[in-house]
């Protein structure tokens, strides 16, 4: 159902595979192998914050041809029409996240993890720059 709507909304979209996010840790190697065998170059992971980011970090180096992996949370539900989007004025002003938070206040604790995640990324970049030297930072 979601695949049909996404393909209708985005003609030319090629979906290399689909996997629900309710697999066990024991099933992870099989899921990773399916992704690697799919030949996908872009991977969207919709497991929710922070699980999707942790999963990507853990497995990115194993995913073969995948060069971009992105945690998309509930975005696929929005594209598939299962969840209503924020009013247009909120979308235009970058406030859709606030609308989502109003719809589901329980997510505030997950959203509060985002600044920590950004800080971890910045720290990692800074430490890498120190090890590799300034000339390699702009890659």
Image (cartoon, rainbow, N blue to C red):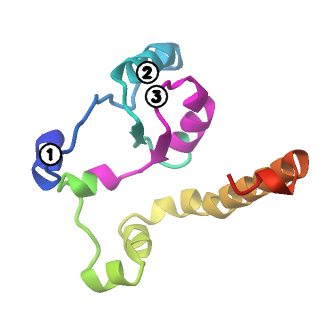
Horizontal relation, residue 119 to residue 85: left or right? right
The answer to which of marks 1 and 3 sits earlier in the sequence is 1
Q: Nearer the viewer, mark 3 or mark 2?
A: 3
Of the pair 26 and 128, the residue shown nearer to us:
128
Q: Is residue 84 above or below residue 19?
A: below
Q: Is residue 84 above or below residue 49?
A: below
Residue that carries the numbered disc 3 in the rendered image:
65
* SS label for mark 3: loop
Q: Is residue 62 magenta?
A: yes
The answer to which of marks 1 and 2 sits earlier in the sequence is 1
Q: Report the disc number at residue 61.
A: none
Q: Report the disc number at residue 36.
A: 2
Look at the image and give the residue range highlighted in magenta: 52-76
For the point 56% across and 56% down, the residue is 110
Assess whether mark 2 and mark 3 are in contact (beta carbons under 8 angstroms): yes
Separation (CA) of disc 1 from disc 2: 22 Å
Separation (CA) of disc 1 from disc 3: 22 Å
Residue that carries the numbered disc 1 in the rendered image:
7
> How far across and how far down the image is residue 59, in percent?
57, 28
Q: Is residue 15 magenta?
A: no
> How far across and how far down the image is residue 89, in percent?
30, 86
> How far across and how far down the image is residue 9, in percent?
14, 55
């Amino acid at each position: 159902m979601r695949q049909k709507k996404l393909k209708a909304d985005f003609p030319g979209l090629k979906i290399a595979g689909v996997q629900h996010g309710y697999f066990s840790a024991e099933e992870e190697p099989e899921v990773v192998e399916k992704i690697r065998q799919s030949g996908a170059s872009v991977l969207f992971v919709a497991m929710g914050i922070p699980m999707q980011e942790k999963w990507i970090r853990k497995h990115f180096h194993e995913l073969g041809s995948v060069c971009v992996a992105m945690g998309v949370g509930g975005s696929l539900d929005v594209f598939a029409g299962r969840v209503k989007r924020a009013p247009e004025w909120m979308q235009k002003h970058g406030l859709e996240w606030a609308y989502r938070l109003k719809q589901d206040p329980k997510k505030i604790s997950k959203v509060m993890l985002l600044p920590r995640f950004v800080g971890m990324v910045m720290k990692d970049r800074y430490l890498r720059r120190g090890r590799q030297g300034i000339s390699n930072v702009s890659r």
